[in-house]
Amino acid sequence: MAPYKEQDDQAAFEEFKIALERRMGRKLYRWATVRSCGGCTACCKTHQVTEVGTDAGELCQFAAIGEGCSIYAKRPFECRLYACWWLRGKGEESDRPDRLKVVMDDREVTLNGWVIGVVDLHEVEPGAINQPRVRQLTDAFLQQGAVVCHWFLAPDEAILPGGERYTRAYLLPEGLFTQAEKDLLLATAEK
């Protein structure tokens, strides 16, 4: 799959988007944002960007800490599509990912015809999920019936087998799923 370049035509853009959706196994949306990234580069570490060869858990070569993306005007397509919850106006000012040290976003998982919302919390620094504010947010999401996935970042000296930098733990709302549904949901969400 060749990277999409800004000067390409609309057909090439659509072709790239479809290929990327197929690879990621989900539809891609461009979210409306109400805030700007400013100097935040948290997602530049938590998310894989294939166009620049960055794996999840390693800081992108174009991230300038405290300043933002050094190629923002010509950033990769994957980055243009992505908007964390904070950018979309959710949470408090102090929840900005570079301050909270956790990037929050969401995805949908289909289970027996039902669409289940999964809230992903990606650590920017190991241990960040254990903060009181993150525990408060996790509890609120669970009370609202969302499935929560904590993405724990391994310390640099403890990279996991296969070069993985994140482990995941799913938290499910109490009483919402049978054990069989839990098993199916976890198997489906891991794809």
Image (tube, rainbow, N blue to C red):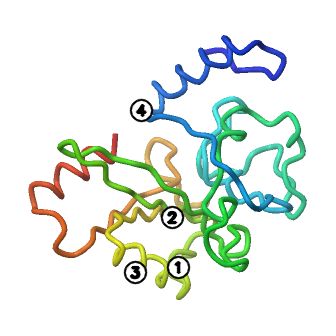
Q: Residues within 10 Å of mark 2 (few under 14, many from 20)?
A: many
Label 4 to label 2: alpha-carbon separation: 19 Å
Residue 176: x %, y % from top left = 19, 68
Give the structural element (helix, strand or loop) at label 3. helix
- The mark found on residue 139 in the picture is 3
The mark closer to the camera, 1 or 3, is 3
Q: Earlier in the sequence, mark 4 or mark 2?
A: 4
Q: Earlier in the sequence, mark 3 or mark 2?
A: 2
- The mark found on residue 134 in the picture is 1
In the displayed structure, 100 sits above or below 88; it is below
- The mark found on residue 8 in the picture is none
The amino acid beneath tag 1 is Val
Give the structural element (helix, strand or loop) at label 1. helix
- The quarter in which the N terminus is drawn is top right
Q: Earlier in the sequence, mark 4 or mark 3?
A: 4
The amino acid beneath tag 2 is Leu
User: Front-most of 143 and 74?
Assistant: 143
Marks 1/2 in contact by CB < 8 Å: the verdict is yes
User: Front-most of 23 and 32?
Assistant: 32
Marks 3/2 in contact by CB < 8 Å: the verdict is no
Residue 3: x %, y % from top left = 69, 20
The amino acid beneath tag 3 is Asp
In the displayed structure, 99 sits above or below 136; it is above
Label 4 to label 3: alpha-carbon separation: 28 Å
- The mark found on residue 121 in the picture is 2
